[in-house]
Image (spheres, rainbow, N blue to C red):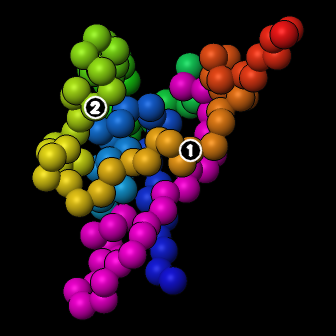
Amino acid sequence: SVSTTVTLPEATNCTLTLIRAAQSGARRIWKDGPRYAKAGLITTDLVLLDRAPRALIGGFDIERQGKLMAALDACNGRWGRGAVVSAAAGMPDKRAWATKFEMRSPRYTTRIEEIPVIRAA
C-alpha cells in the first residue's frame, strides 16, 4: 500500500487546516489509473492545544482559527450535524459516500451520555 506523512508546523484543532493537510498528502501519492477503495488518516503526537509549543515561523493563527471553529460548531449545534461543512466534503446530496454512524462503536470513554445505565426493574 502507498502512504505518506504530512507534518504540520504546530499543533492545531482546526478542521480546515487538517483537511488541507490530508489533501496535500493525497495529492502527493495519487496515481491515475487504479481504483481506490478506501483511505485512512492517522494522527500522531496529539497534545492539548494550550500546552503545545508554538512555531516561530510558519505557525497558524490559532486565535482566528478558534473563533471560526467555534462559529462552525455553534451553527452545527443549532441546526444539526452537517449543517455547515467544508466545501471539500462536497454537497451531502451529491456525495457517493456518507459516514455510517450506526456502525460506530460506543464511545464510553469520551461521551458520558453513551455510558450504559442499569435500571432496576
Of callouts 1 and 2, which one flags the residue occurring earlier in the amino acid sequence? Answer: 2
Furthest residue toward right: 120
Q: Residue at x 77, y 17 (%)?
A: 117
Q: Is residue 66 magenta?
A: no
Q: Is residue 113 above or below residue 37?
A: above
Alpha carbons under labels 1 and 2: distance apart: 17 Å
The amino acid type found where label 1 is placed reads Arg
The amino acid type found where label 2 is placed reads Gly
Q: Residue at x 47, y 80 (%)?
A: 2
What residue is shown with label 1?
A: 104
Magenta region, mostly helix, strand or loop?
Answer: loop
Q: Which of 42/12 is in front?
A: 42
Q: Residue at x 20, y 54 (%)?
A: 95
Which of the 4 quarters of the picture holds residue 110?
top right
Tag 1, which secondary structure?
Answer: loop
For residue 27, side relative to residue 102 (left or right): left
Whole-percent x, y for residue 111 in the image:
63, 22
Q: Is residue 22 above or below residue 29?
A: above
Q: Is residue 51 visible?
A: no
For residue 94, side relative to residue 84 (left or right): left
* Number of numbered markers: 2
Q: In the rendered structure, are the residues bearing label 1 and label 2 in contact, judged by CB atoms less than 8 Å apart? A: no
Residue stretch in magenta? 25-49
Q: Is residue 67 above or below residue 40?
A: above
Q: Which of 9/42 is in front?
A: 42
